Amino acid sequence: MTTTPKSFQDIILRLQSYWAAQGCAILQPYDMEVGAGTFHPATTLRALGPRAWAAAYVQPSRRPTDGRYGENPNRLQHYYQYQVLIKPSPPDLQDLYLGSLAAIGIDAALHDIRFVEDDWESPTLGAWGLGWEVWCDGMEVSQFTYFQQVGGHDCRPVSGELTYGLERLAMYVLGVDHVMDMPFNDPGAAIPLSYGDVFREAEREYSRWNFEIADTDALLRHFEDAEAECARILAAPETDGAGRRIVMALPAYDQCIKASHLFNLLDARGVISVTERQAYIGRVRALARACADAFVAAEAVAA
Amino acid sequence: MPDLLLELLSEEIPARMQARAAEDLRRLVTEGLVERGLTYAHATAFVTPRRLALAVAGLAERSAAVREERKGPRVDAPEKAIEGFLRATGLAREDLEIRDDKKSQVWFAVTERPGRAAAEIVAETVEAVVRGFPWPKSMRWGEGGLRWVRPLHGILCQLSTEAGAKTVPLEIEGIRAGDTTRGHRFMAPEPIRVSGFEEYAARLERARVLLDPAERAERIRHDATQLAFAQGLEVVEDEALLAEIAGLVEWPVVLMGRIEERFLDLPPEVLQTSMKAHQKFLSVRDPKSGRIVGYVVVANRETADDGATILAGNARVLAARLADAAFFWENDLRMPPEAMAAKLDGVTFHNRLGTQGERIARIAALAREIAPLVGADPDLAERAARLAKADLASEMVYEFPELQGVMGRYYAGRAGEDPSVAAAAQEHYSPLGPSDSVPDAPVSVAVALADKIDLLTGFWWIDEKPTGSKDPFALRRAALGSVRVILDTGVRFPVLPILSHAMTHALHAAYITSRSAMIDPIKDLESSGAVVEEIYEARTRLEGATKALSLDDLLGDLGGGQASEVRGKVDNLFSFFIDRLKVHLRNQGIRHDVIDAAFQLGGQDDLVLLVARVRALQEFLGTDDGANLLAGYKRAVNILSQEEKKDGVEYSLDPHPSLAETDAERALFTALDAAEVAIAPALDAEDFAGAMTALAGLRGPIDAFFDTTIVNAENDIVRRNRLCLLHRIRTVMNRVAVFSAVEGG
């Protein structure tokens, strides 16, 4: 029986070493603003094509509309997801997943762990999969998805994706009711830090900027720039000046990520109407599809 | 007689798909066996979150041998024909027989298919069923191509007799059938070897899996009731939720918790919805106060601490959920309903029909118009319509859309609105389904009708009518709802003028919206700096003109063409109402053709009156007099139309009694006069039974007329007079209903 973790970072470290022990490459966060760990190219793009893959990483994620100025016990505009992607999905993925819960101190003999239907769909990524939300004593602790399609392409083989909402999971494991009260490092450390010590001020500042200050005209311009740049990258000839064949799926996908985050910011500023919303999502999806096409083409070159 | 046991063990099957999947498994496997010649006595299917199981008892040991004879070409037929026959039968020439056939000799192919062993047929059937299983949504996993609802891990497939059980040799995409299963995921994960269904079910139960979903649901119901009873409480019944919970657990363990004091002031619907939607908790009520005070959690396992950790965890999650709900409730209460409703001005209802706010203004105008017709105060009806959908802008309804209307009622009530106004917020959505009742408070009736009629006329105007199975705006439900509200409350008014008025409002809305849609791109051009001053001014003028354009101005501008379009669409919509009426009354045993007979009279837009006439008519047609009179009517009309066709003229003049030659003919004249005199006042008094009685008096004279009198008399004057008399029968009877629309007779 494992010990109970003491802090937020303890939980992250345990997940890292658990998934490393299962043979995953432990990647670092992607260096761009994303809405969820799925956006990391190590998930979205690597779920495409025939090559095997196994990766795990923490991804800081931003959802501007969820900002609550640091006051809500559960909601944050910036939070962390832990993401695991294994392709092809191994037959014992459920057991591997349960092993990760044990590693962070959730004893399946005492808790009620359930796999409850939750089909995952990302309209912006043109992606969907089937799976569950995993409940621990009625609390959603993870998303578990078998990817079926990404960027409009069938996933063959199928990837298994696990996403842990780290703050929520950690609050549950540590028995904390307000996220800002959660110990970030070891509470017995010389300088103990809470989640609030690290992030409260950031939540206040970003909430204000997201909701009140962000320049919507500039955001809209940036959205359009990213959209145009994505198209321009993908329209470039596959062969460069030196005769090398290089498809630029990854730089193009960066622009897609940018456009998606800019859309989220515009949404938080409340300048996107219900009907426009669908149109924007469609525009981001078109970018994601084009990048997926390019990635698949690049994989075919590499294979 | 072997028995078959089949189990398909997988990762967790969505609860909502389980019952259907068990039934599909039973049906498809048994049908597949029978198609392949294997009979059985009976079959039962079971389902848990991780497995589909099927027990088929009393299988035949083998399928019967089948002998098939096929006649081929003549012996002297061209070689090609014979080769074709050999290909088709898969036989060689020496396998064929020659038989005499009339004058020639013919090749015959006789194939004998021996009976096949049950195991072989079962294997083939199971593989076909698994590969083609009709899951509502299925998936692939790993590197395989097989589709199942979630990854399939094991197949247990065995045939057992008194001598023991034998695994059916079977392999699907690398999954080989065996004789083992697994118990509860956490409490008994080891493989379990089984032999036959009884042992399977018993061992599973020891391994903490209750195979039968009905038994799981029953255990939950029983244990929950006991737990609640011990504390003087009762479980709120919710069969659908109970079935869903039974599909989430293999080993139900019932735990009960209390809602924290600080949340008990939330409306019971909020407590119940929040607990049900997110947590799948059953609600527990205090029978003395009627308040929701607790909940039942159904866990999937026993624990050393008797569920204390599980219950504490669930309580924490619930507290966070209810804290959210309380936050929404308090925020919403701070905003007056008008302010909430005002938020809907910025929400698009449909891109061709404008905003929610505009729609609400139309509903309010219409509710005011309908109010006096249904006995409601026009001011209250208008007020109610303006606030009825305000809660769509509330935080609570954003979070729990299923609470729309319920919250509106609370918010309007708390804001001190008239109780009838508050009630309309909830009741105007009704009836939501066949089992939902219709509102009877006049203000609610006015708003309910206005809401539905606005929806229908709007989508009728822009030609978004339901087609086939597609009805994305639930227009059938809206029309049927209107019909039910009118009939159940018995409110009397002509529907057509209301529909016409609403249709012109829809026209107005569509027009204004399309003008705005023209203006928006110009605005976009302007903001990009590409537009010169003149265009800016033109746009501003257009915008001003559009905003100021009233309905009357618009109708004046548009002229006659639009008026006839409005009429056409109103008529089309009204016949859609009548179609819904037919569907509705069919369930009450009223015939559609009888409805047509009344409807075809024209101008039948008082639905209550129409239905009264239809009921009286159907009752009359069920009597001996009615049936015979209908036959007489049809005979008269047939002769009349035949002769009119032959002669190329219409016999529609008044017949003259002085030209009558037989007694029966004279008596018919008298009877028609008498009936006519009696029918008119009866109809005026809406006494349809009386009108039918008057008609019944015609039966004898008409029968006697046809028995004794030849219509096509030698004398042409007499003949024409008699044809006109037949015409008069039709005219008199058609005052009551268009009898030719009635089938039979």
Image: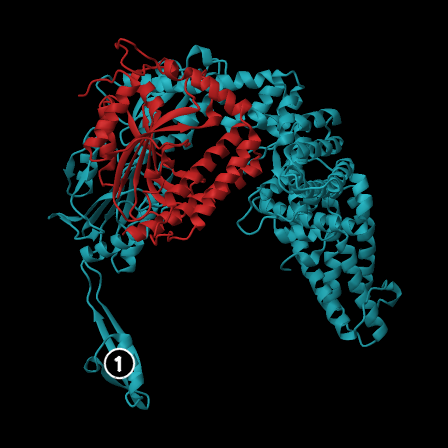
Chain colours: A red, B cyan
Amino acid type at circle 1 is Phe
Residue B502 position (above or below residue A49): above
Q: Residue at x 25, y 38 (%)?
A: A54
Q: Position of residue B22 (x, y in %)?
A: 32, 43
Query: Label 1: few (<14), some or many (≥20) within 10 Å?
Result: many
Q: Residue at x 61, y 16 (%)?
A: B414
Q: Nearer the viewer, residue B445 or A181?
A: A181
The secondary element bearing badge 1 is classed as strand
Q: Position of residue A147 (x, y in %)?
A: 34, 42
- Which residue is disc 1 drawn over? B108
- Snapshot quadrant of residue B708: bottom right
- Snapshot quadrant of residue B294: top left
For residue B360, side relative to residue A41 (left or right): right
Q: Position of residue A153 (x, y in %)?
A: 38, 49
Asked if one can make out residue A22 in the rendered structure from this viewpoint, the answer is: yes
Q: Position of residue B557 (x, y in %)?
A: 81, 45
Q: Nearer the viewer, residue B107 or A232?
A: A232
Q: Nearer the viewer, residue A188 or B607?
A: A188
Label 1 lies in what chain?
B
Asked if one can make out residue B74 in the rendered structure from this viewpoint, the answer is: no
